[in-house]
Amino acid sequence: MKLLPTIAAVASAYEQPKYNDFLDSLSQKSSGWGHPTDKVAALFSLCPSLTEPDNASVVCDQSTCALVCNEGFVATGRRRTKCRFNNANGFFWKRQLGGCDTCADLAAPPAGVEIDATLNDAAQNTFESGEFTVTTTSIFNHPGYGDTADGSGSNMDICLMKFNDNLVTGRTGTAPVCLSTSYPDHGKACWVAGWGTTSEGGNTANLLQSVGVNILGQDYCNANTNNSPLLPDDICAGLPDVDGNGLTDAGIDSCQGDSGGPLVCDVNGAATLVGVVSRDNNGGLLAEVDATLNDAAKDTIEAGEFQVTSTTMFNHPGYGDTADGSGSNMDICLIKFNDNLVTGRTGTAPVCLSTAYPDHGKACWVAGWGALSSGGSSPNLLQSVGVNILGQEYCSANSNNGALLPDDICAGLPDLDGNGLTDPGVDSCQGDSGGPLVCNVNGAATLVGVVSRGVGCADEGHPGIYTAIHTDTWVADTIAANP
């Protein structure tokens, strides 16, 4: 993919104010924030009237109209647009204004939302005998989901869906399931099923998959995993520590795309729903990691390619801590191997660690085997794309990502079209998480960040967010303490 050059500033007689500065000017009843009229920019009143979105008003000055959201709502999409003129189209708006939105009340059923559910389905791309689809009439989210009072907003992630259709009577292949009334016994053999990916960051399955897992008691799970402490509503399931290394064994698990699927046990001869696939809980049920190095094509063993197995994993203590307003940042871990990954190898080399936030506009690279589009399939070949580092103030003023935390690095494409939002087109995506953001610093390949999170992939106004390496000494301290 083509790497963009470092951002160049272009002098102009008119400098568009930052959106937040524009909002401040409104409270002071100031004018002059709009783009002046010229050969192509026309007075706003000459263009067709704009329809005000819900929960918002539209204000105009000179050639520009802007979105102003009601209290409690934030702008989504384009926030400003200019009235233009040409002989072919006459007077017209350059861009369509976006809207204003806010977080839904998680305790209430989502208004106007419907889900089509397909039952008796085994193969996603085949219509089978007895398969049928029904549409929800109501959706009920658990009121505890998103509540951080217990130290996490990620648990209690369960909802109920109501259908007017009868899902059992007169149907073949469907039956009600019993509901569990207690934590299942430690060691009990149960099953989890879904169409999620068949490997971390891999492709989803066409055929419904099922795998047997053992229930692990909470005390046992806390003592034999790298998970953060379990909450009362958490069930831990996977493989116990059979090899005696003090960590639960690797090999079986639910995966991305299985969320919401059933964890079912045989309780007194009856299929009983004991849990719902939730999350990896700060490290998941992975006690070991098999890492393949010098790999470019996933389906081919290449010259110099080799695999090693981890001995220890270290999660950043700040991940999951909501004291700074978010439990999603600091999502970085270190993986230790007894094998030497560099000496005597060809194709591997150590990377330098960043000591400062990289310069705004700096051209860097991100790589991985993640999806090529939001929700899309992952590639066989390793991908790499050039992104520009965006300073925190610039990112906050020109994106809809919300407030950044001190350890966040923002990277993508700058606002080259001047609409007040970072441009779409390049980004990391699902499955790239944990991958490297690398910059050339004084001639040396330098790890400045790790792929963290974002909204969609390569969307306008949503540049990627990366966990910075330089904000604390945890990486260096952990390596030094564990030679």
Image: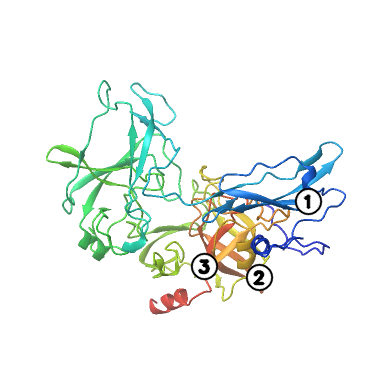
Q: Which residue is mark 2?
A: 359
Q: Which residue is mark 1?
A: 63
Question: Image check: 190 left or right of 96?
Answer: left
The amino acid type found where label 1 is placed reads Ser
Q: In the rendered structure, which disc, 3 or 1, sits on the residue that comes first in sequence?
A: 1
Local crowd size for mark 3, using a 10 Å CA cut-off: few (<14), some (14–19), many (≥20): some
Asked whether the viewer can see residue 77, the reply is: no
Q: Position of residue 329 (x, y in %)?
A: 46, 64
Q: Which mark is residue 298?
A: none
Q: In the rendered structure, which disc, 2 or 1, sits on the residue that comes first in sequence?
A: 1
Q: Nearer the viewer, residue 185 or 406?
A: 406
Element type at marker 2? loop
Local crowd size for mark 1, using a 10 Å CA cut-off: few (<14), some (14–19), many (≥20): many
Element type at marker 3? loop
Q: Which residue is mark 3?
A: 405
Q: Mark 2 and mark 3 in contact (Cβ < 8 Å)? A: no
Q: Nearer the viewer, residue 266 or 300?
A: 266
Question: Image check: 438 left or right of 37?
Answer: left
Front: mark 2 or 1: 1
The answer to whether residue 364 is above or below residue 370 is below
